[in-house]
Amino acid sequence: MSSQIWGTAINLKQELEQHSSSFNFVQAIRLLRVLLDKNKSLDRILEEDVFVEPLLSLAFPGSDIYKIEKRDDKYHVLATFLGLYGPSSPLPVYYTEEIINERLEEKSVKKDFLDIFNHPFYELFIKIWLKYRIWLKIIDEKDEESLNFIYAFLGLDYLEIESKEKRNFLRYAALFCQRPRSAIGIKAIVSDFLNEDKVEIRQCVEVQVEIPVQQRVALGKENTVLGEDLFLGKKVSSRNLAVEIKAGPLKKDAFKKIVPVNNNFKRLQHYLRLYMELPLQCNFIPVLKSSDASPLSLGKEWCFLGVNSWIYTKDKYKDNLVGLWKI
């Protein structure tokens, strides 16, 4: 039995102001965005609501951030790196010393001038840090352009996918990137889609394939060399063109979810056709628990011919019920 974790809700504003040094710089900026307005882009937050400046000190910094405080309707973040003055300044030390002396005289002309350049430095730092962390742009800012990069790796066009399916494809991204495509990948997709562990994939299923007319035997004309191109009949057995997917035994709700008359079946069809690069014949065999089935009854839910209808009496039928649908 899993244990419950009890705790109080975190006051984000209080945590950021009272324990500023416990956050790294990027984390603090992202949390400030959550605190201020999730719908704003990070660029707008840094431009309108947050001002970043270096710590005016020569002391050795213990963390990225010295302090976060709210002044003049803006959050001021005192950072300990990257500034034109402070402990990590690239300028000679006497610049920082002059600004410290100016502060002691309650003036800030030089500091204000350098801060004109300091804040854009931190904006650029954030943008550079986030540039190749695509997942953060997708999660934090719902950036559609970044999401399109992920679909490019899947070999899919983001704009051609229905809006309701866009997020669903991402969960299978790792499978779509693998080569060659495998039965394990098919099993993973079907198991996840049905939320069912009991899924079996049968490969190399024997099927009868029709021989094209131009390849059939014609005595005295063509395709008559024994052991090379001569085949009797119009069909031939093949084991490299078909696969079977067996799922279950399924409960009633799971079975109803996946019947061909349901949109969920079309979604699964779409996923598997995209995943299987080869034009394989795919048979889906759902197994329904006999205890969850109901006899055929016209006008009710168990009445789709060839899908979920069986002619039997519940007292006499003890085995699980099996369907066979083409994908």
Image (tube, rainbow, N blue to C red):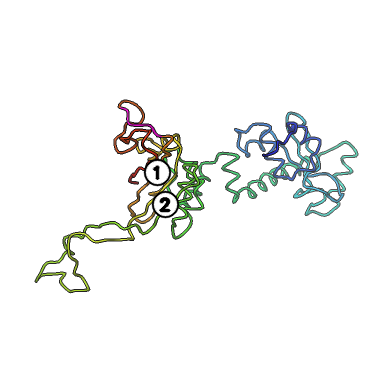
Image position, residue 70 (x, y; %): 77, 32
Mark 1 highlights which residue?
Answer: 286
Asked if the stretch drawn in magenta spans residue 172, the answer is: no
Q: Quadrant of residue 296?
A: top left
Residue closer to the observer: 288 or 39: 288
Image position, residue 218 (x, y; %): 11, 67
| Mark whose residue sits in front, 1 or 2 | 1
Q: Residues within 10 Å of mark 1 (few under 14, many from 20)?
A: many
Name the quarter where the N terminus is drawn: top right
Q: Quadrant of residue 255?
A: top left
Count of labels in the image? 2
Image position, residue 307 (x, y; %): 33, 38
Residue closer to the observer: 137 or 170: 170
Instruction: Name the residue type under label 2.
Output: Tyr
Mark 2 highlights which residue?
Answer: 275
Residue drawn at the location 16% of the way across and 60% of the way down: 213
Residue 288 located left or right of residue 101: left
Image position, residue 279 (x, y; %): 33, 54
Residue closer to the observer: 258 or 30: 258
Residue drawn at the location 38% of the way across and 55% of the way down: 277
Q: Is residue 189 above or below residue 253?
A: below
Q: Reading the chain from its start, which is encountered first: label 1 or label 2?
A: 2
Q: Is residue 211 above or below residue 120?
A: below
Residue 260 located left or right of residue 77: left
Give me the disc on residue 50.
none
Instruction: Name the residue type under label 1.
Output: Pro
Residues in magenta? Answer: 293-297
